[in-house]
Image (tube, rainbow, N blue to C red):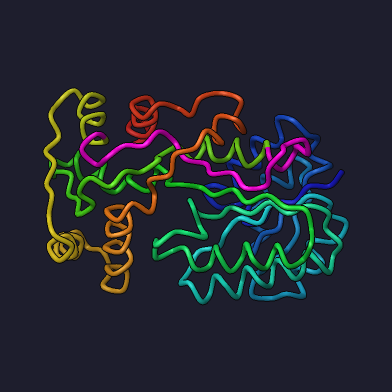
């Protein structure tokens, strides 16, 4: 069996590779990366490091050769870029004769009003059109996405949000990594769409848990979308990114990440790491 993970030097991809190597020999694992020189540590472990660039389909043809089970980790970038890059990866997988594709999608992708949903909808449809057996890992929200806010709190700032009472299924990237690895290795799940959502919490509940972890009260500052944009500018967020971070707050407020499901525990074989414990892990790294 030959497994391959794209984007394996990224934050999520590297964690997935670590989990896989606990269960399969390095000789059965390949990785597709844009810059192979960054994967020297994996190569030293015996992992098959291949050059694969989502903007260069010919490199993907080579990278995916002989692969039976493929994990496509969604790329970074604007929506149009991601749609094009993901399409290149899916088409290359079909040409290479890949037997199974897992893809890291977004919570409730096909119904979501999240500004990041369109590339995931397009990619899921592209994978379905191939006729290749597949699994969609509809990830909710990485708790690591909140590291900037946590660092601000540690520096004495309040927790600023425009999401109101919107709920999020936060979980650690490590939990998502274990879930992805388990699905990639298994062929006995009775479903092919997994809503990987942790227990749902509001911003206020997140702040309460963070207060407990830090042993002091964290102030919650609820503001309008316009005021949130101004706060982000003041924090040094580039102007081009402002619509994205404000849009994420809008998406949370509108309920796009309020997805209840037990799929996460099903795939992990254990409960998702509790919010307070997860926050403790993150704070300990700062």
* Residue 98, image x, y percentages: 82, 58
Side (left or right) of 65 relative to 49 = right
- Which residue is nearer to you in this view: 96 or 58? 96
> Height in image: 9 above or below 21?
below
Is 137 placed left or right of 226 in the picture? right
48 in relation to 95, above or below: above
Q: Residue at x 54, y 70 (%)?
A: 82
**Viewer-proximal residue, 286 or 77?**
77
Q: Position of residue 123 (x, y in %)?
A: 61, 65
Task: Give the x, y percent position of residue 281.
Answer: 39, 29
In which image quadrant can residue 215 be found? top left
Magenta residues span 183-205
The residue under the point 12% across, 55% down is 223
Is residue 216 shown left or right of residue 167? left
Q: Quadrant of the C terminus?
A: top left
Give yes or no for residue 202 being in the magenta stretch. yes
Residue 285 part of the magenta segment: no
């Amino acid at each position: 069996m030959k497994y391959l993970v794209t984007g394996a030097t990224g934050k999520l991809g590297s964690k997935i590779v670590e989990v896989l190597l606990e269960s399969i020999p390095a000789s059965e694992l390949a990785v597709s990366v844009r810059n192979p020189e960054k994967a020297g540590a994996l190569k030293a472990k015996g992992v098959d490091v291949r050059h694969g660039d989502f903007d260069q389909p010919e490199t993907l043809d080579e990278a995916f050769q002989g692969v039976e089970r493929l994990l496509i980790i969604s790329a970074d970038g604007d929506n149009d870029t991601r749609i094009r890059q993901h399409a290149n990866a899916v088409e290359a997988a079909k040409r290479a004769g890949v037997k199974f594709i897992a893809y890291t999608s977004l919570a409730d992708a096909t119904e979501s009003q999240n500004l990041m949903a369109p590339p995931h909808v397009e990619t899921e449809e592209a994978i379905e059109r191939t006729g290749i057996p597949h699994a969609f890992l509809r990830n909710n929200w990485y708790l690591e996405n909140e590291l900037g806010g946590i660092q601000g709190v540690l520096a004495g700032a309040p927790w600023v949000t425009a999401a109101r009472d919107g709920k999020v299924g936060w979980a650690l990237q490590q939990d998502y990594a274990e879930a992805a690895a388990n699905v990639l290795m298994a062929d006995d799940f009775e479903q092919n769409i997994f809503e990987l959502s942790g227990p749902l919490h509001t911003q206020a509940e997140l702040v309460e848990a963070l207060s407990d972890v830090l042993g002091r009260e964290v102030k919650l500052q609820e503001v309008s979308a316009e005021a949130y944009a101004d706060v982000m500018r003041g924090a040094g967020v580039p102007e081009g990114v402002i619509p994205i971070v404000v849009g994420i707050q809008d998406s949370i407020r509108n309920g796009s990440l309020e997805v209840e499901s037990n799929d996460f525990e099903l795939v992990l074989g254990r409960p998702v790491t509790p919010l307070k414990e997860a926050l403790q892990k993150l704070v300990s790294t700062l």
